[in-house]
Amino acid sequence: MKYPLIIGNWKLNGSNLMVNSLINQLNQKLFNIKNCHIAVAPPILYIDRVSKVISDNIKICAQNVDISLCGAYTGDVSIEMLKEIGVQYVIVGHSERRNYHKEDDNYISKKYSIIKSFDLIPILCIGENETQNKTGKTKEICKLQLASVLDNQGVQAFENAVIAYEPIWAIGTGRCPTPVQIQSVHKFIRDYIATYDMNIAKKLIIQYGGSINEKNAAEIISKPDIDGLLVGNSSLNASVFSKIVKIAQASKLI
Ligand code: PGA
């Protein structure tokens, strides 16, 4: 049985007060949720604290990791450090890192590999920008971004892994592709992985991310190849995020 996976990516948001309040509310609202995998991705500074107080059924996701394990890399954090404080998922290839930190597919593939080699679960973000979308290049771009991991590490790298389809133009904009369009991209991704290994493709969790809220979540998550949601803005509000989790849980129970 494949449970939906809902992750709240807090990005660069939070304060001691805000984190305490969000965690208290999430614990109250979500502690008894079953048949749905839930995780939150706080800024690195808060991970240790969140990990100690969060309900057992809510897992911890890191927003980033370095490719080195130790040494003279000012400002970076290693996968071992993350694992030691209870991190289970790591986001890699998010468009904000590709864009603001100039991370390319080759570098992202190295990050992906280090996450896998320490048995953590990578959330590999892929997706097209607005121009690529308008010129019909969405699937081609997704394929290229997947190819860097496939070519370097083989299809086995997608065992126990997550792909998040996140059209860049939909992130933080309030605009989304239609559920039918998202389903079509997800099916394309699964079919592409299936050309390498059918079984891995079947089990693969493919999340959608980009302007998810409590109004659009139900129709999107109801599609057969949409296995989860990567939620940005809406995850900063405990009531909204909890509603999205419950919508996903109910949708995939049927
Ligand atoms: P958003 O962000 O929900 O605020 O659009 C999604 C993401 O970047 O993962």
Image (cartoon, rainbow, N blue to C red):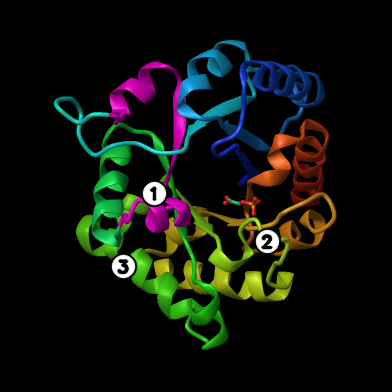
Front residue (pair 152, 69): 69
Front residue (pair 23, 55): 23
Q: Is residue 76 visible to the viewer in this orientation of the structure?
A: yes
Circles 2, 1 touching at the beta carbon (< 8 Å): no
Task: Identify residue for label 1.
Answer: 159
Instruction: Tell me if 55 is positioned left or right of 80 in this view.
Output: right
Looking at the image, is mark 3 or mark 2 earlier in the sequence? 3
Using the rendered view, name the quadrant where residue 194 is placed: bottom left
Picture mark count:
3
The x and y percentages for residue 201 are 46, 61
Amino acid found under the numbered disc labelled 3? Ala
Query: Which dot marks residue 107?
Result: none
Query: Which dot marks residue 147?
Result: 3
Q: Secondary structure at mark 1?
A: loop
Looking at the image, is mark 3 or mark 1 earlier in the sequence? 3
Instruction: Tell me if 141 is positioned left or right of 47 in this view.
Output: left
Mark 2 CB near ligand 1 (8 Å cut):
yes
**Which quadrant holds the N terminus?**
top right
What segment carries the magenta color? 75-103
Q: Secondary structure at mark 3?
A: helix
Q: Residue at x 41, y 66 (%)?
A: 193
Looking at the image, is mark 2 or mark 1 earlier in the sequence? 1
Indicate whether 179 appears above or below 86: below
Amino acid found under the numbered disc labelled 2? Thr
Q: Give the distance between the C-alpha atoms of the residues marked 3 and 2, in whole angstroms.
A: 28 Å
Look at discs 3 and 1 and give the one toward the viewer. 3
Mark 3 CB near ligand 1 (8 Å cut):
no
Amino acid found under the numbered disc labelled 1? Glu
Using the rendered view, name the quadrant where residue 152 is placed: bottom left
Query: Which dot marks residue 173?
Result: 2
Q: Residue at x 24, y 39 (%)?
A: 67
Q: Give the distance between the C-alpha atoms of the residues marked 3 and 1, in whole angstroms.
A: 15 Å
